[in-house]
Image: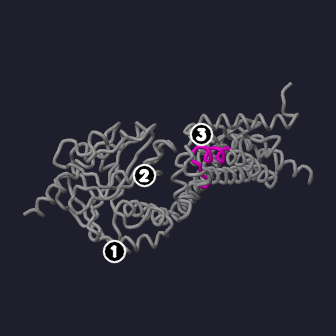
Amino acid sequence: MNTNSNLYTVVYTTLIVVVVAAILSFVAMKLGPSQQANAKAETLRQMMTAAGVDSAENLYAAKNDAILGTYSETIDKAFAINLAGEKVKDLGTEKSKIELIDNFKPQDKAIKSNSDATLPVYVFKSGKTVIPIYGAGLWGPIWGYIAFEADGQTIAGAYFDHASETPGLGAKIKDEPWFREKFVGKKALFSEDVIFLIGKNVEAARPENGVDAITGATMTSKGLSEALSVWFKAYKNYFLNNSKTEEE
Amino acid sequence: MAQKLKETILNPILKGNPITVLLLGICSSLAVTVQLKGALVMALSVTAVTGLSSFVVSLLRNTIPNRVRIIVQLVVVAMMVILVDQILKAGEGTYAIDKQLSVYIGLIITNCIVMGRIEAFALGQKPIPSLLDGLANGFGYGLILVIVAFFRELLGSGTLFGLRVLPEGYIANNLAILPPFALILLGCIIWVQRSFDKDLQEK
């Protein structure tokens, strides 16, 4: 058979591509559910680390199934709000039907264009409220979860993650526990223009609501500061409305 | 025959090491060697991809139209890389490592070692020797990766596999974390290897 004829070449390449596509779609279908379960458990681990349910080490050592159980036991209620701070729908918290909003890119766009964003709020039984933040680091997206005390302004804990920040520099936002511990006890000033700030020597100027940038990771720190201010602003109405009703 | 097989397996590890002798796959060895764990997973992934791709291409070698052989090889390699990535993402224990390696798993497809071994070996040899050649080359690559990662993690973070080995007071060397340090280390490894192996020295 002449393997160099045009007909043979076309048929052969078509066949190869079809076979490879079939194998890959089959594998993607088979592995899809466990990949999604991994991603969901990962999100829960990060949220619960921020909420102080357990230490990051313990949560990361636990199996996916145990994580789902811990979440449904410690969560009080989860719901989604719009930019005006009004509740738009409930999110499931039972172990078998945990619902999360963890695709932040469209939300980030919606916040920035001031259009209809559906933002998740997770209230734990400890009284802590966890909200996500999302933004751009130096090389790719960065995101995280911030837990607030029941007063709706004191930060109780934080967890940050990134897609591809430089290991040892920007990646410190995730790898170094001391960085996220710095946020504990700080206040987000929802009623002011600058709600929270990360930057050079910020801690000296704003001891209550600022955190110093990481040395050698200026761009990542800037991105994180931006992410915090954009997302805090999006939740501003929710937290302000909430603290008002408590005073009345 | 046995002698030839032995050479197929041993040559890529020392005398024909893809990184230190052929100088292939340098960029990924700079990118993924900050920590041992990542380097090890990358080494295993590359070994699996080179081995299996060489095997499959060798099986198909007599049917591949010569004019489009690179494209056919690329399709096979891409499939293997996507499979490895999907499997890593699906495993409970490997999910976090896959996330840490992020794009570099996908970029195995551009690793010159994979295509290099297919072109140079698998296209003209039987499937089993091709499989062994691929695996051995992946191993030779992985070996260097692990050596580099050992020094970078030790000096850059004071840890090995995430466990602290240097005392708390050790001030981490930030240079070790950055890619240029890997290049310096690679240079040192090449230097050491060449000073021991006279055959590799250029006159």
Side (left or right) of A10 relative to A117 = right
Residue type for callout 3:
Ala
Residue B149 located within the stretch drawn in magenta: yes
Residue type for callout 2:
Trp
Q: Secondary structure at mark 1?
A: loop
- Write down the quadrant of residue B152 in the picture: top right
- Lower sequence index among marks 2 and 1: 1
Q: Residue at x 55, y 62 (%)?
A: A26
Q: Residue at x 85, y 37 (%)?
A: B196
- Vertical order, A4 against A60 (above or below): above
Neighbour tally class for label 1: few under 14, some 14-19, many 20 plus, Cα within 10 Å: some
The magenta-colored residue range is B148-161
Q: Position of residue A99 (x, y in %)?
A: 33, 66
Q: Nearer the viewer, residue B148 or B46?
A: B148
Q: Secondary structure at mark 2?
A: helix
Which mark is in front, 2 or 1?
Answer: 2
Q: Nearer the viewer, residue B196 or A110?
A: B196
Which mark is in front, 2 or 3?
Answer: 2
Q: Which residue is mark 2?
A: A178
Label 2 and label 1 in one chain? yes
Q: Are marks 2 and 1 in contact (CB under 8 Å)?
A: no
Q: Which residue is mark 3?
A: B176
Residue type for callout 1:
Glu
The count of marks equals: 3
Q: In the rendered view of the protein, which quadrant contains the C terminus of chain B?
A: top right
Disc 2 to disc 3, C-alpha distance: 21 Å
Q: Nearer the viewer, residue B170 or A213?
A: B170
Q: Which residue is mark 1?
A: A94
